[in-house]
Image: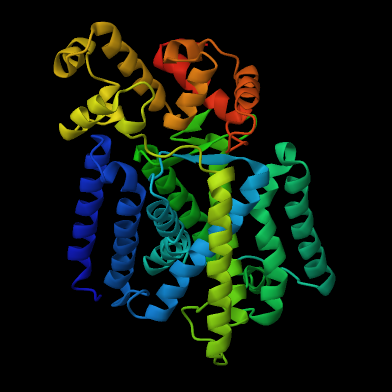
């Protein structure tokens, strides 16, 4: 990609993003489920084109090995945080594709955008001379300071795992504190501590600003997508922008620093491929070995996510409890889905399916429950088992006692962990909001 092509590529990427968002807002598949991927890859291309406009070339096509490494290790890096979330329980996923291979591919493609988005955002700011040079008083770096920084990283990682309810925010600074002392010793030109030692804040500020902007886009795209994550952060669920608690946006700039430090520390060991070529070539055997380990780790976490993080798949008409298969096939043939069924007038549904008004109302109420905040068909079946068959009944529940009743009723019926009290709180809150209750 060169400077002359860049404006056309930016325009095309913006058009693709606009079309994807428009289709998703109307609930049209596959854009509704795959909106996050459909919007993020054009966004990444658009940022690369903006860099090419200023520099004459973009960093992805100019260095394909770097681009491949960035996307691949991005997924592995985020899988690490998914692993931590099994203990933190700060978010979960709803309305993911029902087919497992498709689901795993979609998840991996989504996670692969993390590092490219943050790196390109910071690089875009640099190419457009934002925070190009920001001098500051040089910081004195000592061996003791580096050891204390690494110790702080261990503490930041351990405390959230031992007491997640109180220390969960610390996890977002842990890997920076752990990686930076090692990165400083091995490659000061990449180290953020090295930047502080040189009295140059430009790169740090670009990463912080880029991380903040990318975080805002992450949450915007997620809020539009049908397949999304939902946060269950203790004590921070009242004030939100999109799905994210407002205070949670402070984590994105810090996370950008983590991305930079970890990726470049991996480069020091020949595991990742930086934009700048390493001083010594890396043996192919090491790259193959680390790539295999990364794939194995990703598969391990994906298997665990099925139990710990994925709450529901996209509801299908055939799976809606109480809806006869003949009616499901008939509605599906006419382009219906549980989401459209939930909004359909009962009289029209009764006429279309030759059903009574009572039957039509029951089917609509069940579809409303299935599609409420990612409850899904499996959880709807569990709710109906304990007498919660519609949104109004759900709204009258106490979330903690509801979770306990569901767990008791489903003992021995996997997945055992779902739903958690935090999840039932999301459901009850959504049910009350759907009915217009103020409290």
For residue 153, side relative to residue 383 (left or right):
right
- Please give the name of the residue rendered at 64% of the width and 78% of the height, measured from the top-left corner: 188
Q: Is residue 57 above or below residue 167?
A: below
Q: Is residue 321 left or right of residue 84?
A: left
* Residue 372 visible (yes or no): yes
| Near-viewer residue (358 or 12) | 358
Q: Is residue 399 above or below residue 245?
A: above
Q: How many marks?
A: 0
From the viewer's perspective, tell me whether residue 110 is left or right of residue 252: left
Quadrant of the image occupied by residue 50: bottom left
Residue drawn 71% across the image and 64% down it: 178
Residue 272 x %, y %? 53, 76
Q: Is residue 366 left or right of residue 396?
A: left
Residue in view at x 23 percent, y 68 percent: 6
Q: Pinpoint residue 419: horizontal percent, then vertical percent.
A: 58, 31
Q: From the image, which quarter does the N terminus lie in?
A: bottom left
Q: Does residue 374 appear anywhere in the picture?
A: no
Q: Nearer the viewer, residue 321 or 157?
A: 321
Name the colour scheme.
rainbow
Give the x, y percent position of residue 310: 51, 42
Nearer the observer, 243 or 289? 289
In the rendered image, residue 368, in percent from the top left (x then y), is placed at: 36, 21
Asked which quadrant contains residue 122, the reply is bottom left
Q: Residue furthest right?
A: 144
- 221 lies above or below 378: below
The residue at 32%/17% (across/down) is 363
């Amino acid at each position: 990609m060169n400077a002359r092509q860049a404006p056309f590529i930016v325009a095309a990427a913006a058009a693709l993003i606009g079309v994807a968002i428009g289709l998703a807002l109307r609930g049209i598949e596959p854009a509704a489920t795959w909106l996050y991927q459909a919007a993020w890859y054009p966004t990444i291309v658009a940022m690369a084109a903006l860099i090419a406009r200023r520099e004459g070339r973009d960093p992805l096509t100019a260095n394909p090995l770097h681009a491949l490494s960035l996307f691949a290790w991005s997924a592995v890096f985020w899988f690490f945080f998914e692993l931590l979330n099994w203990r933190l329980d700060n978010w979960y996923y709803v309305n993911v594709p029902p087919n497992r291979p498709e689901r795993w591919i979609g998840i991996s493609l989504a996670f692969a955008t993390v590092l490219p988005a943050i790196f390109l955002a910071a690089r875009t700011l640099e190419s457009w001379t934002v925070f190009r040079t920001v001098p500051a008083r040089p910081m004195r770096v000592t061996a003791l300071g580096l050891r204390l920084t690494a110790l702080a990283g261990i503490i930041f990682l351990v405390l959230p795992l031992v007491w997640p309810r109180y220390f969960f925010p610390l996890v977002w600074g842990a890997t920076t504190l752990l990686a930076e002392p090692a990165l400083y010793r091995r490659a000061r030109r990449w180290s953020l501590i090295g930047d502080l030692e040189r009295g140059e804040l430009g790169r740090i500020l670009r990463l912080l600003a880029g991380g903040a902007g990318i975080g805002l886009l992450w949450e915007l795209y997620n809020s539009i997508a049908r397949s999304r994550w939902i946060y269950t952060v203790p004590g921070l669920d009242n004030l939100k922008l999109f799905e994210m608690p407002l205070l949670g946006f402070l984590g994105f700039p810090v996370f950008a620093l983590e991305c930079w430090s970890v990726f470049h520390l991996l480069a020091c060991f020949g595991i990742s491929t930086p934009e700048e070529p390493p001083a010594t070539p890396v043996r192919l055997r090491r790259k193959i070995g680390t790539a295999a380990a990364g794939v194995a780790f990703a598969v391990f976490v994906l298997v665990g996510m099925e139990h710990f993080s994925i709450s529901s798949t996209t509801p299908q008409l055939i799976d809606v409890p109480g809806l006869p298969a003949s009616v499901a096939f008939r509605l599906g043939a006419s382009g219906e889905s549980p989401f459209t069924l939930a909004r359909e007038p009962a009289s029209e549904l009764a006429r279309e399916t030759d059903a009574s008004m009572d039957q039509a109302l029951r089917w609509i109420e069940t579809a409303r429950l299935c599609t409420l905040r990612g409850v899904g068909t499996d959880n709807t079946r569990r709710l109906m088992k304990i007498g919660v068959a519609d949104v109004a009944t759900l709204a009258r529940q106490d979330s903690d006692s509801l979770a306990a009743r569901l767990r008791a009723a489903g003992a021995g019926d996997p997945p055992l962990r779902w739903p958690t009290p935090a999840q039932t709180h999301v459901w009850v809150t959504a049910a009350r909001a759907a009915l217009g209750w103020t409290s």
